[in-house]
Amino acid sequence: MHSTRTHLYSLRPGFTLGLGVLSFVLFLILLVTGVLLMVYYVPSVEHAYGSVKDISEVVAGGRYIRNMHRWAAHGMVVVVLLHLLRVLYTSAYTRTRRVNWLVGITLLCMTILFSFSGYLLPWDQLAFWAVTIGSNIFASTREVTDLIAITPFFDPGGFARRLLLGGDSVGQDALIRFYLLHTVILPISTIVLVGVHFWRIRKSDGLAIPSGADDLVLRAQGITEPLAIEQAKLRREHTVLSWPTTLWAEGAILLAALAVLMFFAILVDAPLLAPADISMPENPAKSPWYFLGVQELVSYSAFTGGILVPFLLLLSALAVPFVDTEEKGTGVWFGGQQGKRVVALSAVVGSILAIGIIAMAISIGWQWTRNAPAVTALIVNPGSILAASYGLWSWIVFRSTSSTKMSVFALASSCLMGGIIITILGIWLRGPNWEFVW
């Protein structure tokens, strides 16, 4: 995985934060604990809940292993997202790294799908209704096809939902499909893509570092004379042997992650509610936390919140290395001082817009759309207004800085803050019947 020598700049804790290694460590933990859980788990509607309950209460160490698996899965979603943001904010996606950026986006999507596919397996009330709500998001295109009266002939949303569930509702077919996805298809696909990811890093000569990283590292060692710096470069003093230095650093991250996860698994149990019961819906029925921002937007418009906004977000992420081709600032957090100011200001703007638009929708209600043409309600809603506002802000930053990099940072930072605020709203501030609670 590593070349013979590693640049010292790459080993700075504040540069990568160890997020890439931590993501891989969590994946390995999930593989090991997942295999152990498979020994006792039974993927059937009749026995799934009982087998999970036995794992938690009867099998020696079962509860502990299940806790580790559960929290590692949630942790991996967060860490992979943070790793992607680290790559974004250090501009480590230019030139030869474009392909790896696309691989990284794919791995993030697979990580979320990994977690979502495992959500149903306990077959309790939390799992059943979370997956029911989450799968309904896939059918959000029906708002458009119903509007133009073609749903009986062309229903891509319904097809996607049936493909995922194996039918029109969550049942045995859905459980076995989720189990197959979670234990076979996604693990194999992820292992292959992680291998490609590592290979592309190696092909790009390691991590993206600033152009003057050699001098920075040597000056930090006290070598300041120009001639001495050149001689030190010839002796490769700005690098270290990957074995043992780099592997020791990665081993330290592995042990730290294990320690934190094991401690957390002792303190906090993975939830297990009553067995799934279709006749007793949860109120509010909430999707997994990483879909709650989408669920909030879906409450205003199914198509805009469930399809349009996620699609635009994904398309924007995929376009990043092709839109921003500036080499300046590569390997530097936020590309320098200007980037820090843009990111900070964009975070504030994104937060204000999200809070303002959602607060308006909650306080005065979004009821005017009932008296408006259906197509108007489809196009003009909090989700579409928020997306358009963030796009406009990114354009304003580009016009004022003449920098595609700053425009990318502005869009990413505003969307990130908006996503966080809307997700928090869905987690803690939505009660029965999806009413706002304070």
Image (cartoon, rainbow, N blue to C red):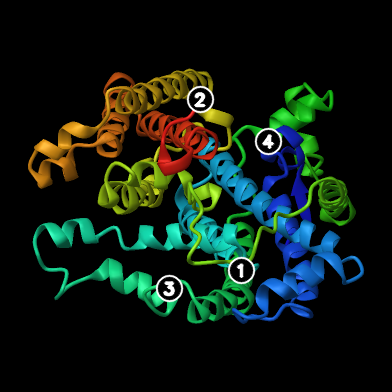
Quarter-of-image position of residue 407: top left
**Residue at mark 1:** 123
Q: Which residue is mark 2?
A: 438
Horizontal relation, residue 168 to residue 377: left or right: right
Under circle 2, the secondary element is loop
| First along the sequence among labels 4 and 3 | 4
Does 312 appear above or below 415? below
Q: Decide which of tag 3 and tag 1 comes sooner along the chain.
A: 1
Residue under numbered circle 3: 164
Callout 3 crowding tier (Cα within 10 Å): few <14, some 14–19, many ≥20: many
* Identity of the residue drawn at 54% across and 52% down: 288
Q: Is residue 191 above or below residue 315?
A: below
Residue 261, percent from left and from top:
81, 50
**Element class at badge 1:** loop
**Circle 4 residues within 10 Å: few <14, some 14–19, many ≥20:** some
Left or right? Give the position of 413 relative to 23: left
- For the residues bearing labels 3 and 2, Cβ distance under 8 angstroms: no
Residue 15: mark: 4
Identified at 63% across, 73% down, the residue is: 187
Give the secondary structure at mark 4. Answer: helix
Alpha-carbon distance for marks 2 and 1? 31 Å
> Gap in Å between the C-alphas at discs 4 and 2?
39 Å
Name which of mark 3 and mark 2 comes first in the sequence: 3
